[in-house]
């Protein structure tokens, strides 16, 4: 029975084997191959076909197994391909999303520009830093940072929850007095509140130049306080409603007083207790202002509706405005500027629309006027007499007299100008205090006197000037304009160079001596040069110092307080430009060629224009940011070009520029082209894009300054230190947090999943 059962169990297999011919086996193998590599792969079907083929021809098991391996390999290949395609699709999606975010943020920055230029700039800055290769992100950033129509605030802090009604900067520029409707508070420049007291803003508050604060107490007495609101003195003789102005010396006060015989703006002499009403329209007078049209004189302007009169301290009326007394229905006001004989007069027109007019007078004659679309509330002059600050309908207009351009500062209820004229402080309706620097890209400016010459810097923002006295003297001039005698025993300097890292000073003398000293004047090392030189410079790491004369340039290694001459295989003739890592440098061989060297002095490559004429010259500018090419400036009168060269000496591309000038200097990102004959200088990036035009000419030389971060520009009449856009935004524009940027609808860049903002 058992043998029969065994035979029955084997019957199907035997039957199949007997039915499966070689033809059938071949067909199964072809079907398996089609299911594996055909147009419509079906790997499960292919496996089933191969298992059937193995059953069909057991002797072909090895061949079938090889085919099974190919199926499994194809399955894995297709799986890997699918994964790769999915990754590529994901990458493309991420790139598309990144590009979309960049475009959105650029559009957001431009939309925000008219309401908050500083926020707009910070949005554009964030976007450009995260999308440096996006041309739209780049152009948006530079369009905003070089936009002269709007101002950027350098500081901001929250002072109160309501509107700021008035704001004053202390004469020493260390404190800010902030007034709301019923409170006055004192803040330091870091945004910390130091003192607060109840005080109605309509009573008025004013500083004298010595820092005394004049206010009105609850009994209508004039009180003098210190900067911390402590009472120093009270004047009880005269009862006043509000203080309109205080003279710079603190002796005289213009205040609204009420007496039986008269009421209106009165002049009060605190030294003699003298009080008189200088105006012939006392009942209607509301505003008084002290004027200083001449350095040694004090005048006062008393204003009422539709008219203004100007008096001296003895009550005699003067026609300083040559008839300009306002005719618009509002109360006109006058502002004066000492030393420049300037008076600013403004009044408002009221008809179907409200508008204001500002007139500028010099020695009694109107020299400029400007109309504004809304009523004017306040004006002030900058210290140099070059700008008028106009508050009109919630915006400040910085009116530049030299080019007649106006820069707008938005969302302002009140302002005050610092005593040195370098910055504005403003208050707004949301309780924010903001500080606005007025210098723009100029971090430093010094108007040179006849015979004075700038010979370099001894600090990032401190120049050295050779005096014009019979006995030559040297002065350092800082950002405030303060002059200090330096190198008193030296009468033979050609140039000075400040080393930022070691804080040492390199002196180049007229008798061909190179000397390095500490800031305290101690000599570290010195050496005699083989020729008379006029220019010096250093590598970024300050380990190499170059000296240029009329015929050639030599290089020294500065180590262990010693100067060691670096031998070069060929002579170089111009200033040296180093790479950021100080490992390489480029310099001219002649007017038409320059060369690339290693820091050890080895000649690596030469670059030549080939054209040899007196009207053409090539200047090596900088190493390109990619580190794979160098840039040069080539001028061939009247044309000029920015040129890229490969490290093999081949010219890659040439970009035509809009200006021709031999005065060119570069930092690591930009180059400045200045002109002697044209009243304009141009800032370019290394794509040849014109970023900014400075209104300055008469330029004799331009030098890199402050570790190649700024430009030192010397002209016939002044010396300036110019910030590049990257330095400007770091130093002069308030840094807004990422959370605040997101609150303004910025789309941020996140690593990983981007959280969706709630609508």
Image: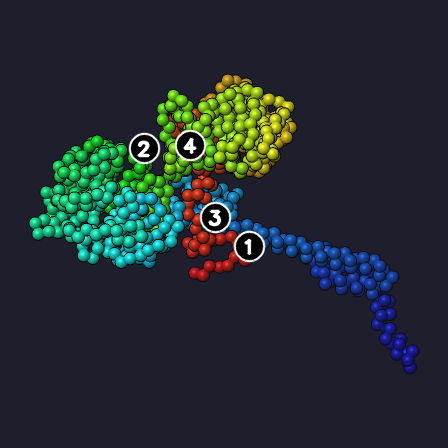
Question: Disc 1 and disc 2: Cα gap in Å?
Answer: 49 Å
Do residues under tags 3 and 1 come within 8 Å of each other at their CB atoms? Answer: no
Q: Compare marks 3 and 2 and give the one earlier in the sequence.
A: 3
In the structure shown, which secondary structural element does the residue marked by tag 3 occupy? helix
Count neighbours of disc 3 (C-alpha within 10 A) and say few if under 14, some if 14 to 19, many if 20 or more: many
Left or right relative to 154: residue 494:
right
- The number of numbered discs placed on residues in the rendered structure image is 4
Q: Position of residue 250 (x, y in %)?
A: 23, 44
Mark 3 sits on what residue?
Answer: 126
Q: How is the image coloured?
A: rainbow
| Residue bearing the label numbered 4 | 476
Q: Is residue 661 left or right of residue 210?
A: right
Of tags 4 and 3, which is closer to the observer?
4
Please tell me whether residue 17 is drawn above or below residue 555 in the rendered image.
below
Q: Residues within 10 Å of mark 1 (few under 14, many from 20)?
A: few
Residue 610 percent across, percent down from the top left: 57, 21
Q: Name the residue carrying label 1.
A: 751
Label whose residue precedes the other's in the sequence (2 or 4): 2
Image check: 715 left or right of 227? right
Q: Residue at image x 43%, y 54%?
A: 740
């Amino acid at each position: 029975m058992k043998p029969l059962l065994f035979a029955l169990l084997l019957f199907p297999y035997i039957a199949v084997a007997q039915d499966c011919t070689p033809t059938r086996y071949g067909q199964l193998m072809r079907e398996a191959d089609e299911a594996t590599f055909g147009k419509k792969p079906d790997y499960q079907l292919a496996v089933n076909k191969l298992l059937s083929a193995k059953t069909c021809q057991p002797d072909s098991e090895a061949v079938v197994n090889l085919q099974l391996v190919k199926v499994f390999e194809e399955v894995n290949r297709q799986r890997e391909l699918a994964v790769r395609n999915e990754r590529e699709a994901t990458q493309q999606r991420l790139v598309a999303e990144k590009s979309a975010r960049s475009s959105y943020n650029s559009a957001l920055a431009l939309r925000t520009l008219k309401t908050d230029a500083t926020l707009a700039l910070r949005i554009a800055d964030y976007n450009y830093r995260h999308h440096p290769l996006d041309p739209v992100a780049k152009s948006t950033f530079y369009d905003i940072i070089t936009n002269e129509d709007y101002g950027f605030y350098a500081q901001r802090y929250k002072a109160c929850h309501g509107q700021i009604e008035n704001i004053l900067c202390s004469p020493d520029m260390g404190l800010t007095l902030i007034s709301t409707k019923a409170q006055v508070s004192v803040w330091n420049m870091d945004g910390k509140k130091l003192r607060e007291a109840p005080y109605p803003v309509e009573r008025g508050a004013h500083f004298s130049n010595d820092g005394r604060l004049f206010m009105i107490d609850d009994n209508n007495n004039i009180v003098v306080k210190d900067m911390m609101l402590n009472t120093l003195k009270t004047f009880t003789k005269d009862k006043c409603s509000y203080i309109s102005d205080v003279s710079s010396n603190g002796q005289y006060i213009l205040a609204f007083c009420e007496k039986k015989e008269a009421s209106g703006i009165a002049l009060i002499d605190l030294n003699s207790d003298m009080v008189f009403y200088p105006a012939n329209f006392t009942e209607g007078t509301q505003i008084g202002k002290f004027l200083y049209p001449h350095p040694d004189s004090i005048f006062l302007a008393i204003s009422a509706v539709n008219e203004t009169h100007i008096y001296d301290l003895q009550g005699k009326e003067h026609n300083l405005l040559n008839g300009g007394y306002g005719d618009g229905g509002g109360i006109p006001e006058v502002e004066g500027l000492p030393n420049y004989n300037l008076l600013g007069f403004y009044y408002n027109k009221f008809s179907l629309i409200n508008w204001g007019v500002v007139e500028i007078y010099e020695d009694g004659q109107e020299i400029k006027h400007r109309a504004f679309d809304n009523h004017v509330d306040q004006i002030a002059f900058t210290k140099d007499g070059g700008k008028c600050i106009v508050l009109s309908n919630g915006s400040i207009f910085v009116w530049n007299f030299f080019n007649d351009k106006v820069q707008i500062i938005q969302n302002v209820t009140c302002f005050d100008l610092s005593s040195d004229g370098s910055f504005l402080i403003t208050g707004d309706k949301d309780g924010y205090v903001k500080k606005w620097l007025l210098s723009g890209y100029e971090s430093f400016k010094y108007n040179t006197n006849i015979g004075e010459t700038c010979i370099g810097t001894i600090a990032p923002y401190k120049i050295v000037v050779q005096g014009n006295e019979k006995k030559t003297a040297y002065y350092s001039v800082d950002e405030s304009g303060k002059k200090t005698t330096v190198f008193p025993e030296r009468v033979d300097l050609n140039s000075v160079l400040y080393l930022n890292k070691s804080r040492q000073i390199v002196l180049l003398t007229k008798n061909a001596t190179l000397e390095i000293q500490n800031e305290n004047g101690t000599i570290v090392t010195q050496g005699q040069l083989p020729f008379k030189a006029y220019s010096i410079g250093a590598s970024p790491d300050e380990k190499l110092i170059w000296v240029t004369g009329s015929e050639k340039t030599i290089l020294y290694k500065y180590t262990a307080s010693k100067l060691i001459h670096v031998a070069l295989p060929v002579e170089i003739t111009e200033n040296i430009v180093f790479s950021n890592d100080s490992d390489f440098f480029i310099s001219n061989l002649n007017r038409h060629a320059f060369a690339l060297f290693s820091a050890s002095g080895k000649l690596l490559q030469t670059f030549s224009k080939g054209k040899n004429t007196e009207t053409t010259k090539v200047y090596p500018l900088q190493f390109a940011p990619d580190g794979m090419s160098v840039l040069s400036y080539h001028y061939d009168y009247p044309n000029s070009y920015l040129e890229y060269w490969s490290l093999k000496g081949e010219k890659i591309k040439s970009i035509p520029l809009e200006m021709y000038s031999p005065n060119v200097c570069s930092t690591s990102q930009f180059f400045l082209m200045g002109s002697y004959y044209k009243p304009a200088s141009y800032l370019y990036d290394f794509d040849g894009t014109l970023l900014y035009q400075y209104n300055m000419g008469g330029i004799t030389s331009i030098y890199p300054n402050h570790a190649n971060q700024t430009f030192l520009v010397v002209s016939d009449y002044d010396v300036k230190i110019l910030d590049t856009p990257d330095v400007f935004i770091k130093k002069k524009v308030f840094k807004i947090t990422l959370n605040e940027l997101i609150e303004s609808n910025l789309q941020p860049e996140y690593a990983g999943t981007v959280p969706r903002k709630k609508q």
